Image: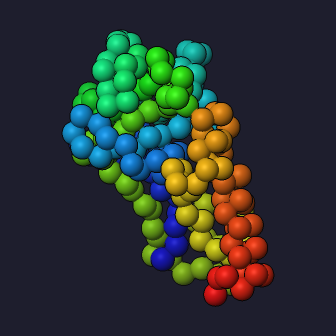
Amino acid sequence: LSRTHPSTLRCSICSSDLAFHSQIISKSFHGRHGRAYLVSPPSFPPPECPPGKTAPAMELINTRLGRAEDRHLTTGLHKVADVSCVGCGVVVGWKYIEARNPEQMYKEGKFILETRRVVGFHSWEDAELRSGESGGYEDEGDGEEEEAVVFDSEDEDECDDIFAGVWDPKVTAQRRRSRIGYLRTRGELA
């Protein structure tokens, strides 16, 4: 089996793709219906559909944004807008528009997707690969399977980055690999 496409988060009702799994920043948030993911906006603007219309900047694909409103959440007062799936209309979460508390400003522009409203999708193909072929979508080929990098709230460097608004999954993955290499050279890791 080989991966044919990146893993995605889909609407649990109509299976519309909403985000790449790699956009998940944290899996330890809570929404109206229990656990939720904090998701970053796409790193590229969505394609224009239909051509000629202006695509909304930095919104999740296949979603519609509701009216912004003040809402009291666990971490205080925030201005948020509900996010609905365009395929079926179900509210799948919300977008943080503005945080009133300076410590919560890292959430601005990011999304909450409720785990009861979205499902992970992994595309696999049962096809034999020719020698030398990596199969599936192109990766950065260091021989290891790439796993989604999730924000670690126990790591001070990552907390500093996220509060400064500069947290990046690629930089975080490189930092973690460097730490593992360092610990191995010191004999602290098998």
Name above or below for residue 126 compared with residue 87: below
Judged left or right of residue 108, residue 157 is right
Residue 163: image x %, image y %? 60, 35
Task: Judge whether residue 31 can be spotted in this image.
Answer: yes
- Residue displayed at 64% across by 42% down: 160
- Residue displayed at 74% across by 66% down: 178
Residue 176: image x %, image y %? 67, 63
Name above or below for residue 163 compared with residue 108: below
Judged left or right of residue 175, residue 81 is left
Task: Judge whether residue 132 can be spotted in this image.
Answer: no
Judged left or right of residue 158, residue 34 is left
- Residue displayed at 38% across by 13% down: 68
Name above or below for residue 168 compared with residue 57: below
Residue 116: image x %, image y %? 24, 45
- Residue displayed at 46% across by 70% down: 125
Residue 139: image x %, image y %? 67, 62
| Nearer to the camera, 145 or 169 | 169
Name above or below for residue 136 compared with residue 132: above
* Image quadrant where one finds the C terminus: bottom right
When asked about the image quadrant of residue 36, the answer is top left
| Nearer to the camera, 29 or 147 | 29
